Amino acid sequence: MGRRRSFGSRLLAGLALASMSICLVLLHQLSQDGKAAIGGATNEAIERRQRHSHRYLLMAAAGSGSVPAAASAIESKQQPSPTAKETAPRNGEDNNNNNNQSSTSDAVDRRLPRLLIIGVRKGGTRALLEMLNLHRDIAMVPVEVHFFDKFDNYQRGLDWYRSQMPLSSDAQLTVEKSPSYYVTPEVPERVYAMNPHVQLVLIVRDPVTRLLSDFAQIEASRAAQNLPNRRFQDVALLPNGEVNTQNRALHVSLYAKFLSRWLHVFPRRQLHIVDGDRLIRDPWPELQKVERFLGLEHLIRRDQFYFNATKGFYCLTGTPTDVSNDNVTLATADENSHHSHHYHHKCLAGSKGRRHPQVPDEVISVLRQFFAPHNRKFFAMVGQDFDWPEQ
Ligand code: A3P
């Protein structure tokens, strides 16, 4: 009996040991999988885990430097200030619409934009974004995502939109710009559904100049497709000399028409309007106004802009961290660039600052007169006079 009992207990002990070993092997396997995943993870894989509440994995990966993109948004910036964190509204503050934000101040994460540059096309949207990105508390999306205006993208949902965002710290404001947001009817309500507290920036310029700029861009892309060039006046005016109101590009310059949709959804105080003509002449004061609107510390400095006579526009110099050597990437801002770089000197790409067509004064005058009442309406709506010529 005694021998059978001891054999039985030895058997039991053996079984217990065997199952413990199996557990240990499994646990080891799991931890190896986890490490391998962290080490070689793509950002998508990390985000998939995030969505399943495994935030610590991302944190660990960011801490160990194994998330290469972690650098993209914040590497060239100083530690974000508490000021911005305290003053800027948070995504989804009042709506539980899938906007789970980090509760840890230094967590590196992808965040939905709290600021959108909604337009206007050819208003100077790229220049504004790049200039704003000099601020350490701004994390810009380098490409136009077109989430709210393109149905296929919108259907992919907010998780997809978030996956397009740069990594940022909690104190940083993520900013995305897609100029067609301004003119697309569905966009204001879609943006509101994401975050009713989102801050909006619109950059406008003299509507006739904007039209010329738009025309120059359209003609450049026609030339790239080997299509014949056209004269501006043949597109903007009808054969009888009247304004061609069917022209699509002309419609984009009717700012008031689109603004009413936005103001129907958002209070005026959530929209800041940048004077694009002034941004060209002297960018710094316009950026100071944007900093104020966003409740950001005034960190962008006048000496971060210099006039480049060859380009004919202001270019950017230095980074918020004041890179003091010249051994940094000399980057050109490009709509198609997928990276935000360190840069010491940076002018916008050749597609910004194109030569405008030579147009007879009478044509300009007809257009100015056409836009004048629309402009006045716009000034009244925004409570700001841009003083665009009427003759
Ligand atoms: P042009 O190319 O007609 O001169 P967007 O980025 O919205 O497409 O706007 C392009 C316009 O930004 C350019 O139109 C240019 O005038 C303007 N812009 C403003 N600041 C600029 C800068 N510092 N460098 C280049 N273009 C700038």
Image (spheres, grey):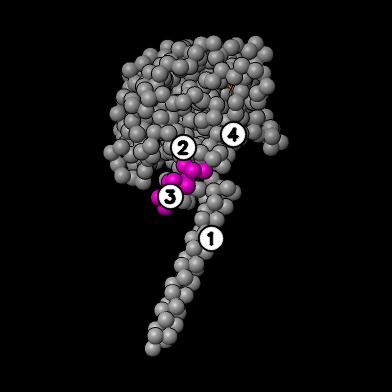
Q: Which mark is first along the chain, 1 or 2?
A: 1
Q: Residue at x 67, y 13 (%)?
A: 310
Counting every numbered tag in the picture gives 4
Is 56 a magenta residue? yes
Task: Tell me the residue that label 4 is attached to.
Answer: 339
Q: Which residue is mark 3?
A: 54
Give the mark, 3 or 1, whose residue is nearer the N terminus. Answer: 1
Secondary structure of residue under mark 3: loop
Badge 4 marks a residue whose secondary structure is: loop
For the N terminus, the image quarter is bottom left
Residue 17: mark:
none
Q: Label 2, on which residue?
A: 108
Residue at the spot of label 1: 29
Question: Which residues are the magenta region?
Answer: 51-61
* Magenta-drawn stretch, dominant element (helix, strand or loop): helix
In three-dimensional space, the C-alpha distance between marks 2 and 4, rounded to whole angstroms, equals: 17 Å
Image marks 2 and 4: residues in contact by CB distance under 8 Å: no
Question: Is any part of residue 14 visible from this angle?
Answer: yes
**Farthest-out residue, left:** 94
Q: Residue at x 51, y 55 (%)?
A: 31
Q: How far across and how far down the image is residue 85, in percent?
A: 37, 28
Assess mark 2: CB under 8 A from ligand 1? no
